[in-house]
């Protein structure tokens, strides 16, 4: 009914504008619903543990785009991701369920080897020359190699356990962080589906 009245009043162009506005509204609702479901899922997974999150600054996406020179579709996706909004929803759900959480400064967590603390270097090859830049990092000292985001997540947990944790891990023995992850090969333009897993300390 609304579309018919709008079409009669504003014509074909106005009707197209209305369709675009309605589509964006539907997309916004879908995204909000997905974010809430994601937050709920995270809380269900860690309800018997604790959550360690990056302390994301304001304008986080804009800073990442500017610092890394992200352009085009990748920049658009990053802006649409609303990471701080997702984190806020997760924190709200954690507070509702009385699940403890802590915010950790993520500085340098994606550029340091989680095995020997050496400076990581990006892996170069045909993928980069063909225009796609996978975020694979390698340690020149011990040979450790993995995705930059996975490395960052591991180091965030290590940083909390080693530098911030008020609970001692024990007076004897060496404690190593064990994190399970899934590596999925995807084609350029596709998005990998992350699999959540709980880090454990041994």
Image (spheres, rainbow, N blue to C red):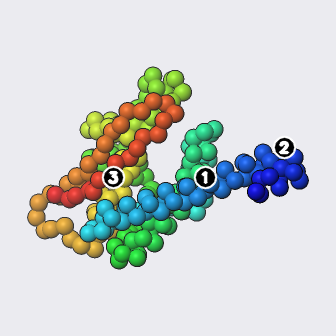
Upstream in sequence: badge 3 or badge 2: 2
Residue identified by numbered label 3: 196
Q: CA distance from mark 2 to mark 1?
A: 23 Å
Is residue 99 placed above or below 82 in the rendered structure?
Answer: below
Disc 2 crowd rating (10 Å Cα; few below 14, some 14-19, many 20+) is few
Residue 201 sits in quarter: bottom left
The answer to whether residue 141 shows anywhere in this view is no
User: Which residue reaches farthest left?
Assistant: 172
Is residue 13 placed above or below 155 in the rendered structure?
Answer: above
Upstream in sequence: badge 2 or badge 1: 2
SS at circle 1: helix
The spot of residue 16 in percent (x, y) is: 78, 45
Residue identified by numbered label 2: 12
Upstream in sequence: badge 3 or badge 1: 1
Res. 27 mark? 1
Quadrant for the C terminus in the image: bottom left
């Amino acid at each position: 009914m609304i579309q018919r009245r709008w079409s009669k009043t504003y014509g074909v162009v106005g009707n197209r504008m209305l369709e675009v506005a309605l589509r964006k509204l539907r997309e916004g609702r879908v995204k909000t619903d997905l974010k809430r479901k994601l937050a709920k899922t995270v809380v269900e997974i860690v309800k018997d543990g604790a959550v360690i999150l990056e302390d994301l600054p304001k304008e986080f996406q804009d800073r990442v785009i500017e610092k890394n020179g992200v352009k085009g579709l990748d920049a658009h996706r990053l802006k649409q991701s609303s990471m701080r909004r997702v984190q806020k929803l997760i924190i709200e759900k954690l507070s509702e369920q009385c699940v403890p959480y802590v915010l950790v400064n993520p500085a340098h967590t994606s550029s340091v080897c989680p095995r020997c603390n050496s400076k990581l270097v990006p892996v170069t090859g045909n993928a980069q020359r063909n225009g796609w830049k996978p975020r694979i990092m390698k340690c020149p000292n011990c040979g450790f190699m993995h995705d930059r985001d996975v490395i960052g997540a591991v180091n965030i947990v290590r940083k909390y356990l080693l530098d911030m944790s008020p609970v001692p891990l024990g007076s004897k023995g060496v404690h190593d962080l064990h994190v399970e992850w899934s590596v999925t090969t995807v084609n350029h333009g596709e998005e990998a589906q992350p699999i959540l897993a709980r880090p454990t300390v041994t």
